[in-house]
Amino acid sequence: MITLNTITWDNWQACLRLKVTEEQDDFIASNMFILAQSYVALLNDDLPPMTFAINDGDKVIGFLMMGYDSREESEFDEASYSVVRFMIDKSEQGKGYGKKAFHKTLEYIKTFPQGEATAVYLSYDPKNDVAKKMYADFGFIETGYEDEGEVYARLGL
C-alpha cells in the first residue's frame, strides 16, 4: 500500500539513496539538494515545507516535497499548493507507483494542511514527456508561464 510519510531520522537516509534513471538526471535536482532547500525554508519561511517519503509498505520508493502560498504571497495571484519535487526511484518505476503516489499527494493537498487553496501548481522540463503526460492525465493544464526552462501547469481544486 502506498503511503506518504513525514521525513524522520528513520527514513531520511533512504530518501537520499533514491535515484532516477540516467536519462532523467537532467530533469530534477538531487534529493540532498531538495532536503537542504527544505531545511532553509523551514528556518526562514512562514509556513514549513512539506516533505515526505513515499512508501510501499515499509520500503521507501520515492520522495515528495510540497509548499503552500497564501494569496498575498503567490506568484500566481491565488492561494495554492505547489508540488516542488516528486520522484520515484529508478528501480521502482514502471510499476504504477507514480500514479498511485501522485493520487495520494492530491488527496493530501485537498485536506488543506496549511490553509485553503484554489489550485495546485507544479513545473517540469518540457522534454520530460513522462511527467507531462502523467500530470495531464491528472487534469493539470499548462499555464503558458515558464521559468528557468520549466513549464508550469495548474490544477484547479
Image: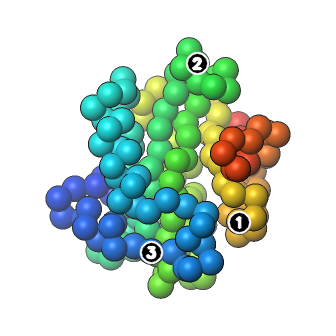
Label 1 vs label 3: CA separation?
Answer: 16 Å
| Foreground of the two, 150 or 98 | 150
Pinpoint residue 105: horizontal percent, then vertical percent: 51, 52
Pinpoint residue 6: horizontal percent, then vertical percent: 30, 53
| Foreground of the two, 90 or 147 | 147
Amino acid type indicated by mark 1: Asn
In the rendered view of the protein, which quadrant contains the C terminus? top right
Helix, strand or loop at disc 3? loop
Pinpoint residue 90: horizontal percent, then vertical percent: 50, 80
Helix, strand or loop at disc 1? loop
Q: Residues within 10 Å of mark 1 (few under 14, many from 20)?
A: some
The residue positioned 77% from the left and 38% from the top of the image is 145
- Answer with mark 1 or mark 3, whichever residue precedes in sequence: 3
Q: What label sits on residue 26 in the rendered view?
A: none
Q: Which residue is mark 2?
A: 71
Q: Is residue 147 above or below residue 100?
A: above
The residue positioned 56% from the left and 40% from the top of the image is 82
Q: Is residue 48 left or right of residue 154?
A: left
Amino acid type indicated by mark 2: Arg
Amino acid type indicated by mark 3: Lys
Label 2 vs label 1: CA separation?
Answer: 29 Å
